[in-house]
Amino acid sequence: MADRHEVSEAGAESPAVPSLRWGELPEGPVVVLLDQTRLPAEEVELVCTDVPALVQAIQTLAVRGAPLLGITGAYGVALAAARGFDVEEAAVALASARPTAANLGYGVRRAAEAYRGAAAGGAGPQEAAAAALAEARAVHAEDVEASARMAERGLELLGELLPGGGHRILTHCNTGALVSGGEGTALAVALAAHRAGELRRLWVDETRPLLQGARLTAYEAARAGMAYTVLADGAAGSLFAAGEVDAVLIGADRIAADGAVANKIGSYPLAVLARYHHVPFVVVAPTSTVDLATADGAGIEVEQRPGREVTEFSLPHRQGAGAVPGTGVAVAPLGSLAYNPAFDVTPAELVTAIVTEAGVVSPVTRERLADVCSVSRWR
Ligand code: MRU
């Protein structure tokens, strides 16, 4: 079951609300999420007391973005264990809530293995639940650290790729503090550039159909005082043609062993544009997003979402609690078919570099990716 309560009106001066936290209520533990469907209009927390509520929050994108999905999955297992639900059933439900982000399965696996290990070692239910929670906290803390490392490495890489500073960076979807325990992935690098006085402009793709760029990245950029401009996804080409983009920075949901990158739909066209215009295309993702068991991009399952997200237009927060993004005013004739993959896959040859917490992979080859993953402490 999930409850919502309003925290405050969004605004640069209001305190940051964490994207996810573990809470203890008199009736038991809860996972508290910042409901991202309601941003930027209002900061409302969603209190999840069971696994179905968390699964629904994942599927409606109240909680989203690869690293945060990993953290959510881990706390979801801990919640099931602490409340005496079937942990194995919970693990399956959480891991299969959305198919593309590698981190979701990774987080669920980590907490479920900690639970099983404790139980196999003779721990009682409470002790095993504590082991699952400790592991979820570890996944969370590691993400904070990974985020800081990626920001450092990414900033250094930008300095090498674009000597002279004054970067004009194009980003897609949302990859900041809203998707992380820390400051995120690609947006954390842009933020580091901003703090170093090296960001001239952040170009924010609106990211149709659910507007993660316009609603969420712009919200984060505004709070951080970054110079940013929102553009319709289709406007990116003219921006490249005008010579206004120095680098593209994006995140990833799953990276295959050959370096192919699944990320928000619209990333691949940006990679093609970047190559044509000789602009670096940089992916920023923790090693927990790399899936060495998937040989290549063709093996990545891309989530297909309801067509109404494309054929209808809505501001989700206007519809009240429980609203599903994309259910609003029809913008296509009734009965129109819609193509709505949530992600696309960019082949490694179009990726200039993959920045992880454990190192930068460039050029992007199977061997270099495996090397960097092998030195990660958390894989
Ligand atoms: O469908 P979403 O909003 O979960 O998609 C998120 C993205 O595509 C992000 O770019 C990706 O998860 C990387 S976040 C660091």
Image: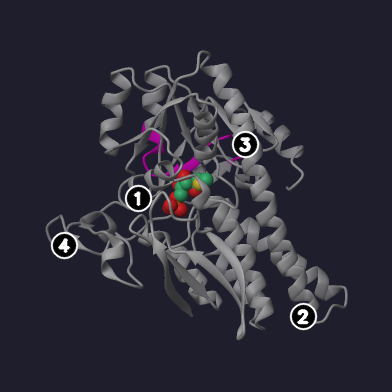
Give the residue drawn at x 68%, y 62%.
136
Callout in the foreground (1, 2): 1
Left/right placement of residue 199 relative to residue 126 reads left
Q: Position of residue 81 (x, y in %)?
A: 68, 77
Q: Which residue is mark 2?
A: 126
Q: Which residue is mark 3?
A: 150
- SS category of the residue bearing label 4: loop
Query: Any magenta on residue 213?
Result: no
Circle 3 Cα neighbour tier, 10 Å, few/some/many (<14 / 14–19 / ≥20):
many
Q: Are marks 1 and 4 in contact (CB under 8 Å)?
A: no
Label 1 Cα neighbours within 10 Å, binned few <14 / some 14-19 / many ≥20: many
Boundaries of the magenta span: 256-269
Tell me the mark number nearer the camera, choosing from 4 and 3. Answer: 3
- Judge depth for marks 1 and 4 and give the one in front: 1
Q: Which residue is at a point 54% across and 18% down the rendered structure image?
A: 161
Q: CA distance from mark 4 to mark 2?
A: 52 Å
When asked about the image quadrant of residue 95, the answer is bottom right
What distance separates the C-alpha of mark 3 from that of mark 2? 36 Å
Q: Is residue 263 magenta?
A: yes
Q: Could you tell me if the residues under marks 4 and 2 are in contact, i.e. CB atoms within 8 Å?
A: no
Check residue 215 in the rendering and tell me which mark sits there, or answer none. 1
Residue 335 is labelled as 4
356 vs 266, nearest the viewer: 356
